[in-house]
Amino acid sequence: MTDPEPPAAAPKRRWLMALPLVLFAALALLFWFRLGDRDISRIPSALIGRAAPQIPLPPLSGLMADGKPVPGIDPATFVGKVSLVNVWASWCVPCHSEAPLLTEFAKDRRVQFVGINYKDASDNARRFLGRYGNPFDVVGVDSNGRASIEWGVYGVPETFVVARDGTIAYKLVGEITPENIEAVLKPEIEKALKAGS
C-alpha cells in the first residue's frame, strides 16, 4: 500500500502540468502582438534603388500578340521605360484573382508591363493568359526560379515598379487589389514617370 499524497503536492503537480500550456499561450500572445499587425505587402526590399537584375529570360513559347511572338526579357528591356514587373504563375491562386485587374491596369500605355512566369508549365501559362487576357508587353520564363531569387521574390505574386534608368523603385509583395492599385501602385508609377521626364 502506498502512502497517501501530502495535501500540498496535488496543486503543485497540477501547476506543473499546466505550465507548458501557460508558456505556449504567453508565446502565442507575444507573437500576435509583435507580428499580427504587420502588413506583408510592406516588407522592405534591399533592391529598391538598385539596378533591376540583368538576367535574360527566354520568351514564353507560342505566346503571340498582334500576330507576333511576345519577346522575352533581356537587359535592354528596362532601359528608357517605366515598367511594372509582375511575377506570376498559372498555379498561383492569388494570381487568378489579380489577373483581370492587371489586364485593366495595362491599358495605361505610358508603362511597359513585364511578366516573369515563375516555375510554370508553358501550356498552363498560355492557357492562363488566354483565359484572362495578356497584359504583358514582354514575358520571360523563369523555369527554375533563379531569376526570381535575384529579384528578391519571396513568393508569387509580387510586383515591382522599375524606373526609366532601370532601377527598382518599388516592390509590392502579394496580390494586386483595387485598393493597392489606387493607393500604392499608381502613385509609385506617377513618381517614376515624373522622375524620368
Image (cartoon, grey):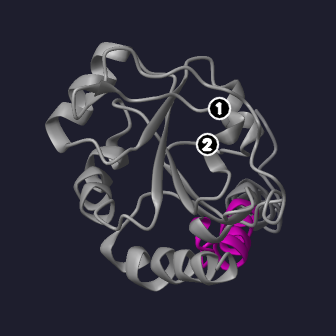
Relative side of 151 to 175, left or right: right
Q: Residue at x 15, y 36 (%)?
A: 131
**Residue 88 image position (x, y, % from top left):** 45, 40
Q: Which residue is mark 2?
A: 77
Structural crowding at the residue carrying mark 1, measured as other residues with C-alpha within 10 Å and reported as few (<14), some (14–19) or many (≥20): some
Name the image quarter holding the N terminus: top right
Query: Residue sitting at 32 percent across and 65 percent down?
Result: 105
Magenta segment, principal secondary structure? helix
The quarter of the rendered structure image containing the C terminus is bottom right
Q: Is residue 190 left or right of residue 45?
A: left
Compare residues 47 and 34 and report the one nearer the observer.
47
User: Who is closer to the viewer here, 97 or 10?
Assistant: 97
Image height of 40 relative to 116, above or below: below
Residue at the spot of label 1: 74
- What residue range appears in magenta? 22-40
- Taking the spot 38% from the left edge, 29% from the top edge, the residue there is 70
Amino acid type of the residue that numbered disc 1 sits on in the rendered structure: Asp
